[in-house]
Image (cartoon, grey):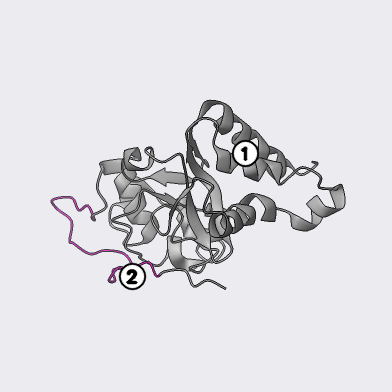
Amino acid sequence: MEWILHKTDVARNNILIKQGGIYLDSDVLVLRSLDPLRRYPFTMGRSTATTLSNGAMLSKPNSIFLQDVIDSYKGLTQEMIKHHKTIISVQRPLQQWKTRPDLPIHVELTTMQRPNPWYDGRDCISYDSFNISDNYMLHIHPVKSAIKNPEIVNETVATLRTTDTTYGAAARAALFGFQDLVFLKNETKTAKNRRPAKPIPPIVDI
């Protein structure tokens, strides 16, 4: 495999199969304890209509499900790998979850990988306000999130305290331990982008 993303896919899977543990991409903000998810043999989050995301995975050692994903790489030619790109690592798990009930996997439908700009729109993290009060984490995808709203990369603690966006809520959870807006005593309680938080809609299968 020549593509670095495929190499890292295989590396993270092999480590989890051997040792178990929790894998998180560097752009994942954890919002609350992951302990409820650790009781399952293997856990991933639904990302889009056709994918589970491997940007966050919890696994006990010797995961049968994860080994099946690894096995799907065997026999692939370079041409097939170039054609499929990341499909193998994120679409294969969804296919197996739907068609192989014998493979032990727990899927979080909204609380690990939603909202995300691949399914909920490019504004969903940096401009919109989604209700992530039940989320275990938020996967930011900063490059895609900043395409239309580049100001996200310039946010500071001072601005995040009163920015009423999905990212603002997640950042406050990481900084202060709660998602509510934070105002200083002498500040007028005026929020940036204040609006009712949207519920995270279910994914429509295709």
- Vertical placement of residue 142 versus 129, above or below: above
* Nearer to me, 49 or 67: 67
> In the image, what residue occupies the spot 80% across and 57% down?
83
Q: Earlier in the sequence, mark 1 or mark 2?
A: 1
- Vertical placement of residue 106 versus 198, above or below: above
Amino acid at circle 2: Lys
> In the image, what residue occupies the spot 50% across and 64% down?
149
Task: Give the residue pinned by disc 1.
Answer: 67
Q: Which residues are magenta?
A: 181-201
Q: Quadrant of the C terminus?
A: bottom right
> In the image, what residue occupies the spot 35% across and 40% down?
34
Label drawn at residue 117? none
Query: Residue 165, percent across and down?
Result: 36, 62
Specify the principal SS of the magenta part.
Answer: loop
Q: Is 156 placed left or right of 55 in the picture?
A: left
Label drawn at residue 198? 2
Query: Residue 192, percent across and down?
Result: 31, 64
> In the image, what residue occupies the spot 62% across and 39% down?
67
Helix, strand or loop for disc 2: loop
Question: Of all residues shown, which one is farthest toward the left?
Answer: 185
Amino acid at circle 1: Gln
Asked whether residue 100 is drawn in magenta, I would say no
Query: Residue 8, percent across and down?
Result: 66, 38
- Vertical placement of residue 54 versus 50, above or below: above
